[in-house]
Structures are given as structure tokens and as C-alpha cells.
Image (tube, rainbow, N blue to C red):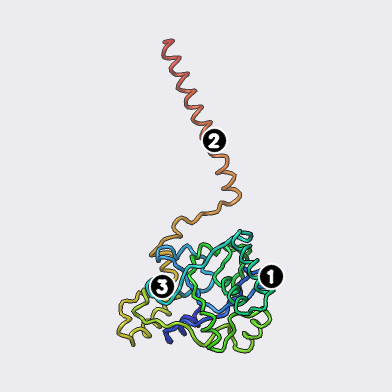
């Protein structure tokens, strides 16, 4: 999921570009920014259950395309898992050595690690304890040699990361991975006016006729229907009634049974 500007930029260029992303899974508390492309491995039927934390637009690409390009699932870990502690030891040991190649490789391992849940802050939303595990993230991180060859650093510390964004105007790199419209299965946009805009863009490409274009509202209501069991919150008066009504019903049942019993006794006496 993404925002409108990125959505249309991706469609027009038919390219997903790498972007530095600040990850806080290393022994360095402030975190480290790695170049990467992130996607969610969610079937269409489960999209409505996501929190839509990153925007109101989505591009549904085929799994075959992702695997061909080298995407793979991230490794989800809890804060204090044994494997994460061992990786931390490796990082410290290579950092103490004079071999820069091993040090870079140890950092690269962390680029595919994600906490199961942690705080999340986006440009528009903030979560105290966001469950990243539910996203089923697939990630593509460029090889170290590829990054160097392109003139980029394989990772940025926080200060360098902020300077990069300030200088470039974003966290994007100028290269990534391409796709064709044949690889696209569906597109989700914010409103119906966006649908017309997208279809006008797709009409220029013969290999885009199969692509389904729907709105976020369609996904949430008409197609998936996750809002049909929306809870109605009771007022204070209704709540008091709802709380006492079962007891009233029980007493009424008891009275009816008692009345039947008295009538039965009278009939027997007669």
C-alpha cells in the first residue's frame, strides 16, 4: 500500500524503486536505514482486514513476478529471541575486527529482520504497538556489490539517513526493479474519480486490459464485507436496560411456571 503520488509514479514508470528504510532491529538503538523494496503477501480476500497504515492505494502484483525478481519473506523475530542475540554477537565481533567486508555482511543480515510487533509512525498515522507480523512482508534488499556499484551506501546511520532525505527530497534511490502490466493483477485506489484516471492510463497499454481497478470502499464493503458485523455501542440508558433485561426475563419465566403450578393444584383439588 502506498500514497497517491507514489502509486501513479510507479504505474507510469512501471518500476518499483529502492528506498532507504529505517529499521530498529540492531544492537544500535537509533536504528539503521537499509535500501529495500517492501511488499505484503496478502490474498485479495484479506486486504480489507489490514490497517491501511501506509496509504489508500495498492498494486497487486503476481507472486511469480516477485519470486523471479528475488523477493523473499522477512524473518520475523521477537525482541529477545536467541537467534537475534546470536546475530548481535556476530555484529559486535565483526565490528571489533579489521575486516570491513565481514562487518558489512553482518549488517546485511539485519536488513531482512523485522520485529513481530513494535511502535510504528508514518506520515499520517501512529501506532503504539503495531503488529508487523500480520503484513506477511516480502522484501528485496539489493546485494552489497550492487549498491556500491550504483554509488550508494549499503546502509545509513540515522544522521546520514536524515541528511540523505533532506538532500534528495525523499528516501528513494534512483534505481529498482521493473514490471510489466502483465504482472499486475489488480489496482486499488481511494475514490471513483481515481478509477477513471487509472483506466485512462491503462487504456494506452494493450497488455493492461485484464487489470481489475477497484476503490478501497469496494474492498471494505461490497467485495469483502468486513463491516457487516459492525458493533452498535449502547447509550447509558440502553446499557442499563440490556444489563437488567435478562434478569427480568428470568423472573417472568419463574412467575409463569409458578402460575401454572398453582392452576394445576387447583385442578387437582377440584
| 3 and 1 marks in contact (CB < 8 Å) | no
Task: Give SS at disc 3.
Answer: helix
Instruction: Using the image as rendered, state which of residue 71 and residue 93 is in the foreground.
Output: 93
User: Which of the two labelled residues, at mark 2 and mark 3, occupies the earlier sequence position?
Assistant: 3
Q: Which mark is residue 165?
A: none
Identify the residue position indicated by label 1 in the image: 29
Image position, residue 147 (x, y; %): 54, 84
Task: Give SS at disc 1.
Answer: loop
Comparing labels 2 and 1, the label whose residue is closer to the camera: 1
Identify the residue position indicated by label 2 in the image: 248
> Which residue is drawn at the image coordinates 45% and 64% (left, top)?
48
In the displayed structure, would residue 264 be above or below residue 42? above
User: Which of the two labelled residues, at mark 2 and mark 1, occupies the earlier sequence position?
Assistant: 1
Q: Which mark is residue 67?
A: 3
Count residues near mark 2 (Cα–Cα under 10 Å), then give few for <14, some for 14-19, many for 20+: few
> Which residue is drawn at the image coordinates 53% and 62% (left, top)?
133
Amino acid at each position: 500500500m502506498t500514497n497517491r503520488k507514489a502509486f501513479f509514479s510507479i504505474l507510469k514508470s512501471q518500476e518499483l524503486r529502492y528506498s532507504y528504510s529505517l529499521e530498529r532491529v540492531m544492537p544500535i538503538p537509533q536504528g539503521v536505514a537499509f535500501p529495500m523494496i517492501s511488499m505484503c503477501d496478502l490474498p485479495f480476500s484479506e486486504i480489507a482486514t489490514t490497517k491501511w497504515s501506509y496509504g489508500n492505494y495498492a498494486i497487486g502484483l503476481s507472486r511469480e513476478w516477485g519470486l523471479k525478481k528475488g523477493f523473499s519473506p522477512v524473518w520475523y523475530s521477537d525482541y529477545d529471541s536467541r537467534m537475534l542475540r546470536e546475530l548481535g554477537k556476530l555484529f559486535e565481533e565483526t565490528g571489533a575486527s579489521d575486516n570491513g567486508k565481514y562487518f558489512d555482511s553482518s549488517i546485511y543480515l539485519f536488513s531482512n529482520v523485522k520485529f513481530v510487533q513494535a511502535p510504528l509512525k508514518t506520515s499520517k498515522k501512529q501506532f503504539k504497538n503495531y503488529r508487523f507480523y500480520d503484513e506477511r512482508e516480502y522484501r528485496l534488499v539489493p546485494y552489497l556489490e550492487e549498491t556500491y556499484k550504483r554509488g550508494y551506501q549499503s546502509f545509513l546511520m540515522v544522521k546520514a539517513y536524515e541528511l540523505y532525505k533532506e538532500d534528495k527530497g525523499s528516501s528513494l534511490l534512483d534505481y529498482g526493479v521493473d514490471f510489466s502490466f502483465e504482472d499486475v493483477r489488480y489496482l486499488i485506489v481511494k475514490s471513483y474519480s481515481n478509477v477513471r484516471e487509472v483506466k485512462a492510463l491503462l487504456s494506452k497499454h494493450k497488455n493492461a486490459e485484464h487489470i481489475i481497478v477497484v476503490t478501497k470502499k469496494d474492498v471494505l464493503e461490497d467485495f469483502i464485507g468486513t463491516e457487516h458485523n459492525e458493533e452498535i455501542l449502547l447509550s447509558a440508558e440502553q446499557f442499563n436496560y440490556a444489563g437488567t433485561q435478562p434478569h427480568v426475563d428470568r423472573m417472568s419465566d419463574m412467575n409463569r411456571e409458578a402460575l401454572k403450578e398453582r392452576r394445576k393444584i387447583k385442578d387437582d383439588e377440584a
